[in-house]
Image (spheres, rainbow, N blue to C red):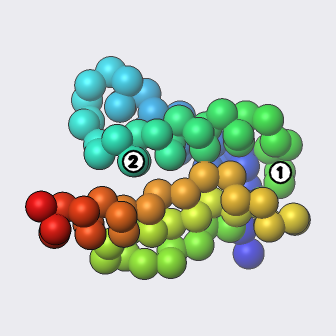
Amino acid sequence: MGVPVKSLLSTMLVKRGMHESGTTHPHPVFANATRILVERLQQLGNEEDIDIDVISSEPIFVRYIRTKNGEVLAEINMTNQEQSSKSD
């Protein structure tokens, strides 16, 4: 069961506002995913459901997926950043 667009969008608008105001300083991967997700959620109906698929929590890999058709709206994928920083 997914999260309604209205609820997720409300949360993500707060997060994006915190990023833009400088209240928080997230990794660029998080900031970019939040921006993309907000843009895409704003195009959907408020009652549509979004699945949040946590593929991995260490390193973080999360996908936001439209429940009705499986479209990936945005993802946060830190797996590549973790591997590149370990090889430096």
Q: Quadrant of residue 59?
A: bottom left
**What amino acid type is highlighted by mark number 2?**
Val
> Which residue is at 72% across, 49% downward?
5
Residue at the far front: name it: 87
> Which residue is at 83% across, 54% downward?
48
The mark lying in front, picked from 2 and 1, is 2
Place of residue 67 in the rendered image (x, y in percent of width and height, measured from the top left): 80, 66
Residue at the far left: name it: 88
Is 83 displayed left or right of 11 in the figure? left
Is 58 displayed left or right of 68 in the figure? left
Label 1's element? Answer: loop
Q: Which residue is mark 2?
A: 29
Q: Quadrant of the C terminus?
A: bottom left
Q: Which residue is mark 1?
A: 47
Q: Reply above or below: 39 against 9.
A: above
Circle nearer the N terminus (2, 1): 2
Place of residue 3 in the rendered image (x, y in percent of width and height, measured from the top left): 68, 61
> Which residue is at 70% across, 59% downward?
72
> Which residue is at 34% across, 41% downward?
28
Q: Quadrant of residue 18?
A: top left
Is residue 3 visible in the rendered structure shown here? no
Neighbor class of circle 2 (other Cα within 10 Å; few <14, some 14-19, many 20+) is few
Q: Quadrant of the N terminus?
A: bottom right
